[in-house]
Amino acid sequence: MSNSTFAQTPSKPCAGAECSQFDFWVGDWDLTYSDTVHATNRITKEMGGCLIHEHFDDPVHSYKGESWSVYNPQSKLWQQTWVDDQGAYLVLTGAYNDGKMILLTEPAPMQDGTKKQSRMVFYDITPHSFTWDWESTTDEGRTWKNNWRIHYKRK
């Protein structure tokens, strides 16, 4: 990459309002799901405000994962990559609209020929709490099944 490419980059490329849409998630959280399981999630804003970095820890199930989320101004969408200690790797894309952040995977073929798509939905967002659902569809989004709900409460 040439120096002229860097010279054309704005001094604050992630200062736009869209780049702050995920700021509600930044902080330290206590999580409850399955009515009893408690986990923690630490979300940081890094790289000059361009990156939202998630550090998920569920000590009950010895499960850890991390995600990296960035706003793409060309597509006007959020892009997230998730990895965990179980070998999962997910790529999601989505947007913040009507008080909800919704990120989706690409539809993937299943053995029976149908395609499955998953999404995460952040909603009921307040300064101190929100709800997160992991949902899936096999009918091209006409109906969604809730697979996992997490209640977030700020520490």
Image (cartoon, rainbow, N blue to C red):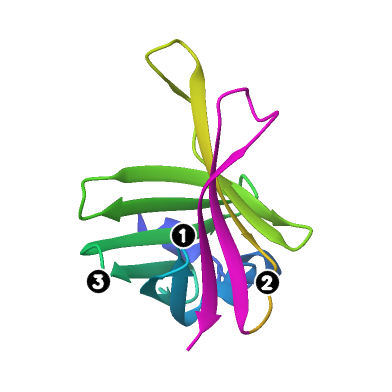
Q: Is residue 59 magenta?
A: no
For marks 1 and 2, the one nearer the N-term is 1
Q: Is residue 50 above or below residue 93?
A: below
Residue 64 spot, x, y in % from top left: 26, 63
130 horizontally vs 109: left or right:
right
Secondary structure category for the residue under label 3: loop
Q: Residue furthest bottom?
A: 155
Residue at the spot x=36%, y=52% of the render? 82
Rate crowding at label 2 as few (under 14), some (14 to 19) or many (20 or more) other CA atoms within 10 Å: some
Which image quadrant for residue 28? bottom left
Is residue 16 visible in the rendered image? The answer is yes
Question: In the displayed structure, would residue 8 be above or below residue 26?
Answer: above
Q: Which residue is mark 2?
A: 125
The percent position of residue 100, horizontal first and vertical second, equals 69, 59
Q: Which residue is mark 3?
A: 59
Residue mark closest to the camera, 3 vs 1: 3
Front in this rendered view, residue 135 or 42? 135
Cα distance in 3D space between marks 1 and 2: 18 Å
Q: Is residue 11 visible from the viewing direction of this image?
A: no
Cα distance in 3D space between marks 3 and 2: 25 Å
Q: Quadrant of residue 58?
A: bottom left
Q: Main secondary structure of the magenta part?
A: strand
- Identify which residue, 148 or 124, lies in the foreground: 148
Q: Secondary structure at mark 2?
A: loop
| C-alpha separation, residue under disc 3 versus residue under disc 1 | 24 Å
In the visual, does 55 lie left or right of 29?
A: left
Give the magenta-colored segment's residue range. Answer: 128-155
Instruction: Name the residue tied to disc 1.
Output: 69
Disc with the residue nearer the chain's start (3 vs 1): 3
Of callouts 3 and 2, which one flags the residue occurring earlier in the amino acid sequence?
3
Q: Given the image, on which type of amino acid does mark 2 rest?
A: Ile
